[in-house]
Image (tube, helix red, strand yellow):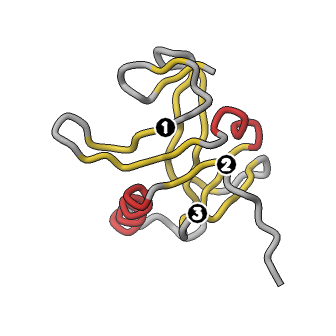
Amino acid sequence: MMADTLMSPVVLTEGAVNQLKRIMEEQKIPNTYGLRVGVKGGGCSGFSYVLGFDEKKDSDQSFDIQGIHVLMQKAHSLYLLGMEIDWVEGLNNRGFSFNNPNAKQTCGCGTSFSA
C-alpha cells in the first residue's frame, strides 16, 4: 500500500542534500524541524528566496525529498514549481543556488527574482 504523498514542487540535487544533512548534524537541528523553502517580498528583483530550518505550520505542505523533510506554504508553490536547489562550491561562489524556471528576471546575486 502506497502512502499518500504529494509530488514535491522543488528538486534538491545530491550536493544540496549532502550539504543540508551536514548542516542539520552540525547545527543539531531538532527532528521536529523541516527545511522551509519559500519566497518573500524584497530583493533587487521583487522576491527573495527563503531557505532555512523551521517547525511545520498549519498552512504548510510537507514533502520528503531524499530524506529531507521539506516545508512550503501552499501559495509559494506557484512561484517555486520546478525549481532546483543546488549546492555550489567554486572559486567565486559557495552556497545554495536556485534554478527557477518561473523567474522572468533574476539579479546578479542569484537570490532574487521577479515572476
Work out how far the residue at label 1 is from the one at label 2, CA to CA, in angstroms: 13 Å
Work out how far the residue at label 2 is from the one at label 3, CA to CA, in angstroms: 10 Å
Q: Residues within 10 Å of mark 1 (few under 14, many from 20)?
A: some
List x then y, in percent, for residue 41: 60, 22
Q: Which amino acid lies under the numbered mark 1 shown in the image of this protein?
A: Asn
Count of all numbered marks drawn on residues in the image: 3
List x then y, in percent, for residue 46: 56, 16
Label 1 sits on residue = 99
Q: Residues within 10 Å of mark 3 (few under 14, many from 20)?
A: some
Q: Does residue 2 appear left or right of residue 76 in this picture?
A: right
Q: Is residue 56 above or below residue 4?
A: above
Give the mark, 3 or 1, whose residue is nearer the N terminus.
Answer: 3
Mark 3 or 1, closer to the camera: 1
Q: Residue at x 52, y 34 (%)?
A: 49
Q: Is residue 67 above or below residue 88?
A: below
Label 3 sits on residue = 65
Give the mark, 1 or 2, whose residue is nearer the N terminus.
Answer: 2
Which element carries disc 2, helix, strand or loop?
loop
Q: Does residue 21 appear left or right of residue 56 in this picture?
A: left
Q: Which amino acid lies under the numbered mark 3 shown in the image of this protein?
A: Ile
Give the mark, 2 or 3, whose residue is nearer the N terminus.
Answer: 2
List x then y, in percent, for residue 3: 79, 76
Label 2 sits on residue = 9
Q: Which amino acid lies under the numbered mark 2 shown in the image of this protein?
A: Pro
Q: Residue at x 54, y 19 (%)?
A: 42
Residue 78 is drawn in which quadrant? top right
Q: Image quadrant for the N terminus?
A: bottom right
Q: Residue at x 31, y 46 (%)?
A: 88
Which element carries disc 3, helix, strand or loop?
strand
Which residue ends up furthest to the front in the rendered image?
Answer: 101
Q: 52 or 111: nearer the eye?
A: 111
